[in-house]
Amino acid sequence: MRLLIAGGGGFRVPLIFRALVSGRFSGLVTELVLYDVDPGRLDAVTAVLDSMPPGDSSRLPVQATTNLAEALSGTTMVFAAIRPGGTAGRVADETVAQDLGLLGQETTGAGGISYALRTIPHMLHLVRLMRKHCPEAWLINFTNPAGMVTEALVPVLGPRVIGICDSAGGLVQRAAAAARVQLPEGRLDGVGYYGLNHLGWLYRLESGGRDVLPALLADAGALQSFEEGRLFPQPFLAELGMLPNEYLYYYYRLDAARLAMQAMAQTRGESIHRQQQELYPRLASAGPDAYRLWEVARRSREEGYLAEARHDGERRAEEDLAGGGYERVALSAMRALAGGGDTQLVLNTRNTLTPAGQPEAHPPASPTAAAAAPQPAIPGLPADAVVEIPCTVTATGAVPLPQQAPAGAQLELLQRVKEVERLVVRAATTGNRNAALEAFAQHPLVDSPDLAAKLLAGYEQAFPALGKMWEGGRR
């Protein structure tokens, strides 16, 4: 199998390579191609790969290129993790919002909208080239904001695009460990989870046919043993009756998060930008020491994740610092899509019990049945919307597992944010500036037409390409 990583100069690429040369995914890929627009970043990442300790299998051939058409030719699987504007773009995503007194976070709220607006056109360029150079290839999308980006790509690739994020799956695994539940490998039948990317809830966790989540939510000691359980007060979780995804901290504890971020000497984006500006040239010239330097930087970066939500001196759990989240999700999905056996994962895909573009499992009983509207896996959200949900992945794609209807407050928030996401996709795909303005205004973490106008003006100043995107677009 030939695997292409678009964004091959990305900081986390060595995690994927490490998983491909050792452990259960060893031998799955026979050729790895790294594509990036920045040759210096490619040099740095290939230096890390070259200096990595040998794995279980023979050395995996790696090709690095800045030619996208050449990279796509003959490719079976594409992983996409691009960041237009680089880490400097992330800094602007965060600071434009923060300077207006709003939450400064790269994927949630105003920063996430900005990130999506400038990223979706680049991802559409990638998938259109895929249709030309490798029409049968699958795309596994890591590019953030993963839900919005995936929704924009489905009209082009249909079911051959799947979005991934390790946050929801990590919550399931951490909650299961805290509740002392042994989840069967590759199975999520007893797990109830519904949401959008970076906005979801674990509402059921079964063991032996019994839901053990209420007991976990009542156990303050067990909740303190994992990240999401520590983010929120135990009485709040018990009353909620669910475990929120960690990114819901920005909704439930908005003021605390915003004030903590403003009190920091630098934003998360500024910290990462400075780290990478200094690190990448060192990696490229470090020779056999490149992997060690990268590993030290990776652990430092992981320690700073969601720092605004932790008390002074509190450290992340060792298992979180060890690395190995999103690449395991991606490679598990890749193996299933390649015919290596079915698996169940929390993924970003269309909210329909039959994947778009795939034939029904059985012929419909009647013409009326054939014309019936597709059934949503998460009731209350559109069947054609991209959601984050447990899925069964096979060689024909990802099929969501049916979930219960979200409770009133959760459904209202999901519906509102999904409408914002769809406005963002419309703005980015049609050049409709008014849709972008409305997206900012409607987002619950902005909720102001006046602030929306200031945000959009600020992002247009930071990213001149946005202004050009509206030229000729539908206003």
Image (tube, grey):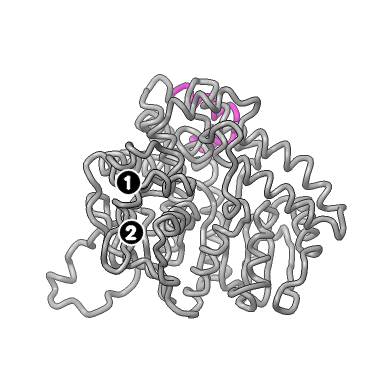
Residue highlighted by disc 2:
205
Q: Quadrant of the C terminus?
A: top left
Q: Nearer the viewer, residue 212 or 163?
A: 212
Is the Cβ of the residue at disc 2 closer than 8 Å to that at disc 1? Answer: no
Q: Position of residue 436 (x, y in %)?
A: 42, 34
Q: Position of residue 92 (x, y in %)?
A: 60, 31
Instruction: From the viewer's perspective, tell me whether residue 357 is left or right of residue 329.
Output: left
Q: Nearer the viewer, residue 104 or 6?
A: 104
Is residue 471 something that shows in the picture? no
Location of residue 466 (image quadrant):
top right
Q: Is 146 drawn above or below residue 367 in the view shown? A: above
Camera-nearest label, 2 or 1 = 1
Residue at point 32%, 65% (across, down): 207
Residue 468 belongs to magenta span: yes
Measure how far apart labels 2 and 1 are at the Cα level: 14 Å
From which residue to which does the magenta span run?
Answer: 453-475
Q: Position of residue 235 (x, y in %)?
A: 32, 37
Residue type of the residue flagged with mark 1: Ala
Q: Position of residue 34 (x, y in %)?
A: 69, 62
Examine the residues drawn in magenta and state their main secondary structure: helix
Q: Is 32 drawn above or below residue 381 in the view shown? A: below
- Label 2: state its secondary structure: strand
Q: Quadrant of the N terminus?
A: bottom right
Residue at point 46%, 43% (across, down): 428
Residue highlighted by disc 1:
218
